[in-house]
Amino acid sequence: MWLVAVIWSLRVAGVFQGDLVNEGGWSLVVAFVVAVVSPDLSPEFLLLTFDAMLKTLAYAVCGTFFCVVIGSVGGVLSSQVWWQSLGKGYNSAWLVVRAILAIPRAIHELIWGLFFVNIFGLDPLVAVLAIAIPFGAITAKVFSEILDETPREALFALLNSGVPPGSAFFYTLIPQAFPNLLSYSFYRFECSIRSATVLGIIGAGGLGYQIYLSLQSLRYQQVWTLIFALLLLSGCTDFLSGWLRQQLQLPSRLDLNVLKLKQHSHNHPITSSPNLFLLGAFVLLIFSFWYVKADFAKLWEPRSAERLAGIIQDVFPPQWIDLNQLFFLSTQTLAMSILAMTSAGLAGIFLSFLAARRDTEMGRNLFIPLLTRFLLLFARAVPEPIWALIFLFVLFPGILPGAIALAIHNFGILGRLMAEVIENLDQRPLHSLTALGASNSQVFIYGVLPATIPRFLAYILYRWEVCIRATVIVALVGAGGLGRLLTEQLSNFDYQGLLTTLIIFIGLTFVVDVISTSVRRLLR
């Protein structure tokens, strides 16, 4: 069935029709690649790059802070166990909260950014809110799943002893789940770095904005300087986040089977090193709010309320534009996401085995894992719109360059997550197969693959949920789909048409979410 979907997606992308390659663009690609050996290292541009890097980091820190706050409150309120602890009269309340949080989660942060620009103008507050709101809703969903799968025997023991539900909840479930909640918070921070870069393209500043300007003006030496800075920022974040998880005995960035992860980790106390790390994170948070200088007073200014009220008034009633056009653009969006995730999944699976480091390999051959990890870091650090702009040098505008850009970015993320699955495999069954005389290939086929493929498929499906929203990003630079129509309507202040398109887009993301969640539940 998936093969049929891929063939259909290739047809929608126009692969079978020809005329996809712009031969005149190869000279630009060559010039871009050659420029890697001569980045712009002038003092003035290095100073500009450093400022852009700090701005991107500060946006990510501030956005993640509010994201975790929203996620913590929303995670508790959308968890089934919280309402169960209150009594039988609240059995369905968690579904209502989850339904409310599903709407901001379905809208990409870029759309939020463009929406807030119309209310607050080009203020740093736009980037902070655009990260905080959708990521907060996503974090609330994950936090609620972690809480629901945390052992609750101690909780009900306290409740039966007459302890108030709030006290019982926060003295039993939260301490058990805290390492996993903290680990996911740092994973979300890694995602915020990438989102802060993307939001720079719409004028928020930072590395994304500078890369976009330099690429548009064909200043490739500057582009590579900025890309190296982005790699440094992403690499440091990746390393520190991984180090903290190691200290907490949490081997995976994102474990979709949180029950197993929790059982492995909750008995380990937090040592002094992570406490020092958290102290440094607090200092970084204070610095970031100071450096960003977001004008939070605009949140309660009468002028902002008037603009918001004006937009709401202009939105209703929705304008039912050409349904044939909406259907066609929806098929383009779906086809783009299928092509992207199929390519990203296959490439991620292949490279994950090269990127994985196991204890038996330590001290022997680390060159291939390190090189592969750098390739994965490079793929996921560069934002999707930048990849799309590069491929638009040689491909005509359409969903194909968008699908390729999304595939490259997502295979960098998937490859790293899958490599952690391989690194954390239980080695005892593999040693047993070897002791019984199985060859290396037999151990791989009958031992490694059955243990990893279900987890790999779960990650691919999870990223498919993210990818369908990310089609909006590449649409900004020339890819098709509903994202292109959304950005055009926002730019033209066509709020009635925007609401209609947004309803269709949210409906499409819900369909993908339902399919992905259902299949992932079966894989468990």
Image (spheres, helix red, strand yellow):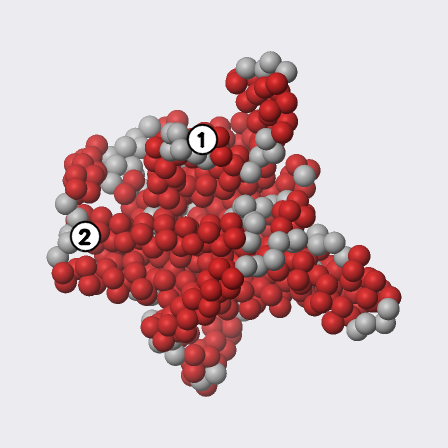
Residue at image mark 1: 361
Q: Which of the 4 quarters of the picture holds residue 372? A: top left
Q: Looking at this view, is 458 or 322 the one in front?
A: 458
The disc labelled 2 sits on which kind of residue? Gln
The residue wearing badge 2 is 222
**Above or below, comparing residue 182 to residue 442 in the picture:** below
What kind of residue is marked 1? Glu
Within-10-Å neighbours for mark 2: few <14, some 14–19, many 20+: many
- Please give the name of the residue rendered at 56% of the width and 67% of the height, measured from the top-left corner: 70
Residue 122 visible within the image = yes
Disc 1, SS: helix
Q: Are marks 2 and 1 in contact (CB under 8 Å)?
A: no
Check disc 1: other Cα within 10 Å, few if <14, some if 14-19, many if 20+: few
Circle 2 SS class? helix
Which residue occupies 79% across, 73% down? 164
Of residues 225 and 330, the one nearer the viewer is: 225
Residue 443 vertical placement versus 268 (above, below): above
Pick whichever of labels 2 and 1 is earlier in the sequence. Answer: 2
156 lies above or below 522:
below
Residue 505 in view: no
How far apart in space, not on screen, are marks 2 and 1 (Cα)? 38 Å
**Residue 213 left/right relative to 438:** left
Q: Position of residue 152 (x, y in %)?
A: 77, 57
- Does residue 96 appear left or right of residue 332 in this picture? right
Q: Nearer the viewer, residue 287 or 83?
A: 287
Nearer to us: label 2 or label 1: 1
